[in-house]
């Protein structure tokens, strides 16, 4: 979906800095420490050639390290023609704050390659990815103990597997080689639940938000999550999983989905899985989908009357040009930086509640942390305790049934209860449990600041305050 440029907007990097300064104005930090936390430590730019289609093609890539208050640093690698140093540094800064907010022990980093992956076939993309990885690996910008990438826009499990293999080829004696990157396929050292993680995190964030009546009322809403009407912008990995889980498990009606070729609307609720399959068959196009009305100008559906707006793809889709027309009382930033600084000011003035990106899309880095720990421990989660859990549960069930028979009580346990109770936690269950706990705990830390300090005013500033405080505490412990 192409969004119009708004000439008076600050850049994405400046937007992150301005939001940072809104928070630090309410904090007691020395000017020197504040500046140390704000600035990006380093950015490496690489230009490399790959022989493709009979000639040498030159590509430009970046790896930015925002903060090394904890190591390794963590952050995705995106493939997009829009990648720039400014964007990568802004995303690296967000990663620092995001990791601090959800208490994953990483600093912030980000990478990007200026490329449209759709222009290259699989073999060519592998050659490009491996050469990019080579350039970063030989400078320790990919390393299990120093810098650990993950998927981002335009990349996925496949690219992460190529990077992991390239690292292993270059570091044949590193027993922890698989931990050099996360988001790998499960058969290549990945973890169950990583692909869905960011979308699942959005779901858990909304579940937690709707547990607090005071917060729901602040968004001029009432009741539970079930039955709420949502508009989703972007049906990529994050938007698809968020929309699927919310509609299928929580009873949310996804009334519109905006994509790059337009939007599709159905007030009764779109069948997300059917839409996804349609897009897979038709090259990502929503036009012609039989179970919804097509809207050529996809940006317009962001202004629809709905309960929740979930921007899940691009930066700056909500900006000064359209913020005043946004009707949703609750915005959930499933993408990085979808609301510009100028739009944020307009929306706050209208009383719109925004669940900020550094929290709402933290599911990916949370489960990446679990994958990294799995790779370092060299054992999958649940392998040692699952059957022990099942055995203890079985003893309890059998004892209850024996007592019932001995006392003539005549009651029996429902079969579906027994099946669920007797099932030990496998890796996926443990990953989802850990993610749920992380999202709950992080939200509670934000709302404590939001409601406990009248001058804070909104969740974004609260999130920054929590995150910056934790980064500052780590730097102070190092003697800064």
Image (tube, rainbow, N blue to C red):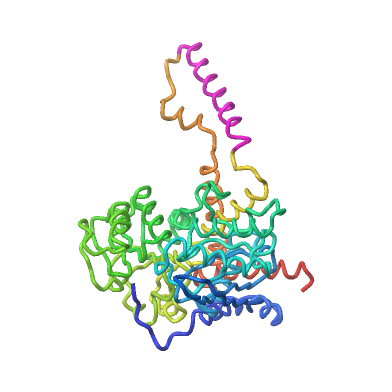
Q: Nearer the viewer, residue 351 or 479?
A: 479
Counting from the top left corner in percent of width and height, residue 391 is at 58, 26
- Report the magenta stretch's main SS: helix
**Looking at the image, is 393 positioned above or below residue 382?**
above
**Looking at the image, is 327 positioned above or below residue 273?**
below
Q: Is residue 272 visible?
A: yes
Counting from the top left corner in percent of width and height, residue 442 is at 56, 59
Counting from the top left corner in percent of width and height, residue 472 is at 69, 70
Counting from the top left corner in percent of width and height, residue 194 is at 51, 52
Q: Residue at x 36, y 77 (%)?
A: 323
Task: Give the magenta part as a residue range.
Answer: 383-408
- Please tell me in which quadrant of the rendered image residue 328 appears: bottom left
Check residue 388 for magenta coloring: yes
- Please tell me in which quadrant of the rendered image residue 284 appears: bottom left
**Looking at the image, is 439 positioned above or below residue 220?**
above
Q: Nearer the viewer, residue 126 or 464?
A: 126
In the image as oriented, which residue stretches furthest toward the front?
A: 54
Q: Is residue 455 visible?
A: no
Check residue 115 for magenta coloring: no
């Amino acid at each position: 979906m192409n969004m119009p440029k708004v000439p008076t907007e600050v850049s994405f990097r400046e937007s992150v800095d301005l939001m940072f300064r809104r928070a630090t104005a309410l904090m007691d930090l020395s000017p020197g420490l504040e500046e140390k936390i704000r600035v990006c430590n380093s950015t490496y730019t690489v230009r490399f050639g790959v022989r493709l289609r009979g000639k040498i093609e030159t590509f430009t890539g970046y790896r930015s390290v925002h903060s090394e208050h904890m190591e390794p640093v963590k952050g995705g690698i995106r493939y997009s023609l829009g990648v720039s140093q400014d964007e990568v540094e802004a995303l690296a800064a967000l990663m620092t704050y995001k990791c601090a907010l959800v208490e994953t022990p990483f600093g912030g980093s980000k990478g990007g390659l200026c490329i449209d992956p759709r222009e290259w076939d699989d073999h060519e993309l592998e050659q490009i990815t491996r050469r990019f990885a080579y350039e970063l690996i030989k400078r320790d910008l990919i390393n299990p103990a120093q810098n650990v990438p993950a998927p981002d826009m335009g990349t996925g499990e496949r690219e992460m597997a190529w990077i992991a293999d390239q690292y292993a080829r270059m570091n044949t004696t590193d027993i922890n080689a698989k931990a050099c990157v996360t988001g790998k396929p499960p058969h290549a050292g990945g973890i169950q639940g990583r692909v869905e993680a960011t979308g699942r995190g959005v779901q858990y964030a909304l579940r937690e938000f709707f547990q607090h009546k005071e917060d729901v009322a602040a968004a001029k809403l009432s009741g539970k999550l079930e039955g709420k009407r949502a508009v989703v912008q972007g049906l990529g990995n994050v938007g698809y999983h968020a929309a699927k889980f919310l509609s299928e498990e929580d009873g949310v009606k996804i009334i519109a989905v905006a994509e790059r070729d337009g939007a599709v609307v159905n007030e009764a609720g779109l069948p997300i899985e059917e839409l996804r399959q349609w897009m897979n068959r038709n090259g990502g196009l929503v036009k012609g989908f039989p179970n919804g009305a097509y809207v050529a100008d996809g940006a317009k559906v962001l202004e629809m009357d709905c309960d929740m707006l979930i921007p899940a793809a691009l930066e700056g889709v909500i900006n000064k040009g359209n913020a005043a027309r946004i009707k949703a009382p609750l915005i959930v930033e499933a993408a990085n930086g979808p609301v510009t600084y100028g739009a944020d000011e307009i929306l706050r003035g209208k009383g719109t509640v925004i669940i900020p990106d550094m929290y709402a899309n933290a599911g990916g880095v949370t489960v990446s942390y679990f994958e990294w720990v799995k790779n370092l421990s060299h054992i999958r989660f649940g392998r040692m305790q699952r059957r022990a859990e099942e055995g203890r549960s079985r003893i309890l069930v059998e004892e209850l049934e024996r007592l019932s028979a001995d006392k003539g009580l005549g009651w029996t346990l429902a079969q579906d209860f027994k099946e669920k109770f007797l099932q030990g936690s496998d890796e996926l269950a443990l990953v989802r449990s850990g993610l749920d706990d992380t999202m709950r705990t992080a939200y509670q830390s934000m709302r404590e600041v939001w409601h406990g300090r009248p001058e804070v005013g909104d969740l974004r500033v609260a999130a920054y305050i929590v995150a910056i405080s934790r980064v500052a505490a780590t730097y102070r412990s190092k003697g800064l």
